[in-house]
Amino acid sequence: MAKEIRTIGVMTSGGDAPGMNAAIRAVARACAYYNVKCIGFYRGYQGMIEGDYCVMNARSVRNIISRGGTILKSARSKDFRTPEGRKKAADHLTEAGVDAMILIGGDGTFKGGQIFSKEYEIPVIGVPGTIDNDIAGTNYTIGYDTALNTVIDAIDKIRDTASSHDRLFFIEVMGRDAGFIALNSGVGAGAEEILIPEENLGLDRLLESLKRSKRSGKSSSIVVVSEGDKTGKNVYQLADYVTENLPNYDVRVTVLGHMQRGGSPSCFDRTLASRLCVKAVELLLDGEKNVMVGLINNKVTSTSFDKGLSGTHEINKELLRISDILST
């Protein structure tokens, strides 16, 4: 028989993402609605190890739905990778009376939770919060939509100056192993070329594409590059290569960096966070454990950690074809 859940812990871990505060709010208020105590742990697993936590209620999370970042802070904990670290974390959960945990983060967060749950038999539910959108078991992760809009806004501004000075801009966006941000923002911003880790188009293809743009009468171009793209060693090497082979181009590089993580979350991310986290609380109360919640075909679903972590979230390659057509 499943243990009665009277206290639920919540934390944010890994890279921060817009909408994490909306997720924390949803957990705290769903707990209040169902008359369950809520404990928030600061700095993810490290806060669990150090016993750094607070009691949260419906009023603790007022006015945070519109804020970027996470009020519970976030961190990547090396100590939690050790049995000794996880033992300390388990002891502090016992001390706080926590019966189950909701983990808001990415695949690293879920892997840690899966191991911890098996070792100490504590029910765990994962909520996907990462701008990379690279987690199987959901069409969208919390923070992805906001990051896309941030990138689009930045590219639109850069295109203004590119057009004014007849320049070629390489714009690097986040996405170490996944090209979701680059692909979708590139199509949305009308980029002439999009470089992503999933499709190594090669330097020759890049040069030919830029030559074709020049021949068609374009005086400026935008190339969106995912940080994990393998076409060159890095975006600066790509820019140097193009400068050497196409000297008529005035080449510039812009790395958007961590600005993509910040900012007020979009309506979509606020709503997504709210839906997923209410479901996470309800799943725990229904005796579910070791699953992640996600949105598939606009329905909130649950997927086992084993399936979610072993699967892959495929990019839409049709967008590459569309990009080629529209960049003519």
Image (cartoon, rainbow, N blue to C red):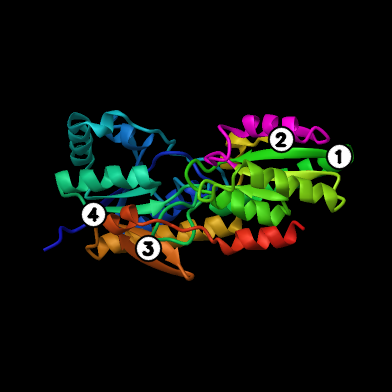
Q: Which residues are magenta?
A: 226-253
> Reading the chain from its start, which is encountered first: label 2 or label 1?
1
- In the rendered view, would you say 327 is above or below 43? below
Q: Position of residue 152 (x, y in %)?
A: 69, 49
> Reading the chain from its start, which is encountered first: label 1 or label 3?
1
The C terminus sits in image quarter: bottom right
Residue denoted by label 1: 166
Residue denoted by label 3: 279
> Reading the chain from its start, which is encountered first: label 4 or label 1?
4
Q: Nearer the viewer, mark 4 or mark 3?
A: 3
Give the SS element for disc 3: helix
Give the CA separation, mark 1 to mark 3: 51 Å
Residue denoted by label 2: 242
> Reading the chain from its start, which is encountered first: label 2 or label 4?
4
Residue denoted by label 4: 6
Residue placed at 74% from the left, 34% from the top? 245
Give the SS element for disc 4: loop
Residue placed at 61% from the left, 58% from the top? 320
Of residues 86 and 4, the one drawn nearer to the viewer in this rendering: 86
- In the rendered view, would you say 125 is above or below 248? below
Give the CA separation, mark 2 to mark 1: 15 Å
Amino acid carrying mark 3 in the image: Lys
Of residues 178 and 210, the one drawn nearer to the viewer in this rendering: 210
Q: Nearer the viewer, mark 3 or mark 2?
A: 2
> Reading the chain from its start, which is encountered first: label 4 or label 3?
4
